[in-house]
Amino acid sequence: MSDLPQLQPFDAHNQKLQSEVAPSDYVNPTPEGRYNLVVIGAGPAGLVTAAGAAGLGAKVALIERELMGGDCLNVGCVPSKGVISAARAAAAVRKAAEFGVNVPADWQADFTTAMDRMRKLRADMSHHDSVARFSDLGIDVYQGSASFVSNNKVSVAGQELEFRRAVICTGARPAELPIPGLKECGALTNETVFSLTELPKSMAVIGGGPIGSEMAQSFARLGCAVTQIEMADHILAREDPDAALIVQDAMTTDGVDFQLKATTKRLKQQDGRTAVVYEQGGSEHEVVVDKVLVGIGRSPNVSDLNLDGIGVEFDERTGIKVNDRLQTSNRNIYAAGDVCSKFKFTHSADFLARIVIQNTLFHGRAKASALTIPWCTYTSPELAHVGLTAEAASADGIEVDTFTVDLKDVDRAVLDGQTDGFVRAHVRRGTDEIVGATIVAEDAGNMINEITLAMTLNRRVPKWKKVLRLAKGVGLSAIGSTIHPYPTQAEAIRRLGDLYNRTRLTPFVKRLFARWLAWTR
């Protein structure tokens, strides 16, 4: 029986998961000689760093104190998308009549089966992050908590490992919010919500960020009465307000009850349930629910590493301080992933790890600032973003022109019944250089990749070559000239290019064309 909340219930699926990512009979290797790289933390950043370095011939040690795979496999991306997929299936059944598909009026979503499916799929995927796989790659995998002994030694489970370089990839955990009654009422976090086997009749979700919004909509679609409490005047506060409001309206349709401009004051037990007291409009209100999910706040895992003892600067709130090459204040120590980055995504951890490999093993000069990092919130519709918003561009002194195509004007979106959304791009004024984009659509996470690629390729062209017109980056004009299959929702991205190209037809150019055509008649 496991006492880890991530492995509850300890059924056959979670037993299989444990056997892969934290086998109880595993015996740590005995260190022999100095390691080129010691990696602390086996989440996405740590796994990519260790595997990449070992693949290049480095002698690598990988240390994990709980479950290989980190948040992504165990309590993040994988289980959440399993739940979201089930919720989307339920929503599709609910809308089936609109497409001429009749379903029984008394149909129900089976939450228990949906969660069992999620746990099975998670266990089936876990071999990719398993102790056995990484051992087979030639990596010395150690189970236990790591603590630095000196600038070139770290201890784990009673052994000391000597290294040339070390990388801290310990990730982050749910923040401990100063809300009275939170612990006493057994509030859920992303580390415990996926252990549920029965659907609560009601739930309060504290926070309107990506985690809170994804789970609020999913639980509502599966039949739970959900109240979402958010301090701002809309959810997903870092996104374009009109984009966030489209998602918020969709969630309202799914049954989520929003309490906005509201601050959670305290929780209290009430007849076996939980009363959530929040302040809104200068007065206190209360909602009584079966479960509470805290969906805000992440704290970096920096404790117990003895960072002070080896001169690594860190902050309890923001994490380990690194330079653009991901090097800490101790030149032998680097960091990657959630423990040091403001971009707390699996895909950013992956690419930060690639930078670490170059810089630790080969004296590289790769920079984190060179990355173009998109993100996506997997609500329905999804909300994806890359680069700057118009407000952020203005704050940076960048003048932009903005182009927007509404999905209601895109044939495939109309046929799919998915017209609530848009595709938007900001270009540097006077050019077609994309500096940011936002997409609200059912498949926005896939659609954003085309724009991200264009921005990445554009950044790789030296500015002096652009000035001398020796080379040109990939901008909105090129996207407009790229043939897209019809009908697809991604055609909206091509139409952004059309909008830009029309701006090049100035009145002067149009007059020249008119004269030429009149002369050649």
Image: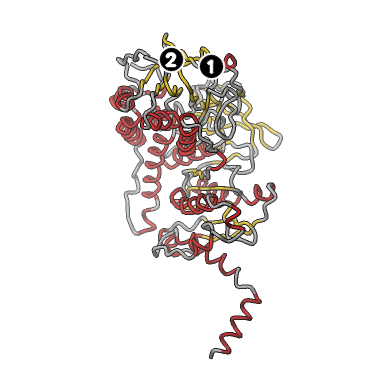
Quick check: can you spot residue 179?
no
Q: Residue furthest top?
A: 158
> Residue at (46%, 39%) from the top-left corner?
347
Residue 116 percent across, percent down from the top left? 32, 32
Q: Is residue 180 left or right of residue 35?
A: right
Q: Residues within 10 Å of mark 1 (few under 14, many from 20)?
A: some
Residue 42 vs residue 389, the one in the foreground: 42
User: Which label is found at residue 428?
Assistant: none
Q: Residue at x 46, y 12 (%)?
A: 155
The location of residue 187, given as percent across then percent down, is 51, 25
- The amino acid type found where label 2 is placed reads Leu
Q: Position of residue 355 (x, y in %)?
A: 49, 35
**SS for tag 2?**
strand
Q: Name the spot of residue 247 as percent of width and height, x first.
A: 53, 48
Q: Residues within 10 Å of mark 2 (few under 14, many from 20)?
A: many
- Residue 265: which quarter of the image? top right
Residue 151: image tag: 1
* Quadrant occupied by the N terminus: top left
Q: Is residue 131 left or right of residue 246?
A: left
Q: CA distance from mark 1 to mark 2?
A: 11 Å
Residue at 37 percent across and 56 percent down: it is: 97
Q: Residue at x 65, y 39 (%)?
A: 261
The residue at which mark 2 appears reads as 161
Mark 1 or mark 2, which has the lower sequence index?
A: 1
Asked whether the residues under the numbered discs 1 and 2 touch, taking CB atoms below 8 Å apart as contact, a structural biologist would say no
Q: Is residue 391 visible?
A: yes
Foreground: 193 or 372?
Answer: 372
Its colouring scheme is secondary structure
Q: Depth check: 382 or 456 in front?
A: 456
Above or below: residue 67 compared with residue 155: below
